Amino acid sequence: MRSKKFLQAEQAALVWDGPGLIAGVDEAGRGPLAGPVVAAAVILDELNPIRGLADSKKLTLAKREKLYDEIRARALCFSIAEASVEEIDTLNILQATMLAMQRAVEGLRLKPAKVLVDGNRLPRLDMLAEAIVKGDDKVPAISAASILAKVHRDRWCVQYHEQYPLYGFAGHKGYGTVEHLAALREHGACPQHRRSFSPVARVL
């Protein structure tokens, strides 16, 4: 027979972490020198699981693209949001990332009972939330969010490359590669470079 103390603890846990929809949240683009930071929130359909979900960084481009379409078609709902370069430079990259995550959750058509966020920090939310380190490897909904955010941002880089081909955004996706830094030194910064990031600030 369970002790009274155990029953109270179990009931408290159930009240705190009750049933309901669970959303996974992740971001892409904290490290690059240019472009927005992108966050996604996904509520998966437990009765319609998606095979092959994993941390987006561990998937091939072709696999990410396939899963991107599958997640959008089969998830109960999803939302993709951004924080702009101006917001990154004004707030700092951490706060801009939290803002993008908050916008992604608020953009969900269905309101989750709980939000699981990749990493060790939480955005400001009006529902129960938990930060999970390496959650994109452990929680399918976070994996799905990481894929949506990564593909969305990569596509943004490809489109922006058409406007500013000198910088090679389609290849390095805004990260500080040797080629990107050389282009920065030669051509200066474009409107989507993060001026608060030291490699960009140095060339200004």
Image: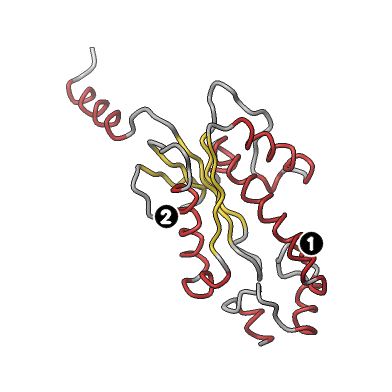
63 to the left or right of 88? right
Nearer-the-camera pick, 108 or 27: 108
Q: Which mark is residue 170?
A: 1
For the image shown, how many numbered marks are present on the structure?
2
Circle 1 packing at 10 Å, graded few (<14), some (14-19), many (20+), is: some
In the displayed structure, would residue 12 be above or below residue 65? above
Label 2 environment density (alpha carbons within 10 Å; few <14, some 14–19, many ≥20): some
Assign a secondary structure to mark 1: helix
Location of residue 6 with respect to 195 vertically, above or below: above
Residue drawn at (55%, 49%), measured in percent from left and top?
26
Q: Position of residue 201 (x, y in %)?
A: 62, 83
Which of the 4 image quadrants contains residue 137? top right
Colour setup of the view: secondary structure
Identify the residue at image location x=54%, y=45%: 79
Residue at (38% x, 36% y) in the render:
113
Q: Are marks 1 and 2 in contact (CB under 8 Å)?
A: no
Residue highlighted by disc 2: 123
Q: Which residue type carries mark 2?
A: Pro
Q: Is residue 8 above or below residue 127?
A: above
Pair 1/2: label in front: 1
Left or right: where does residue 65 sit relative to residue 87?
right
Q: Give the structural element (helix, strand or loop) at label 2.
A: loop
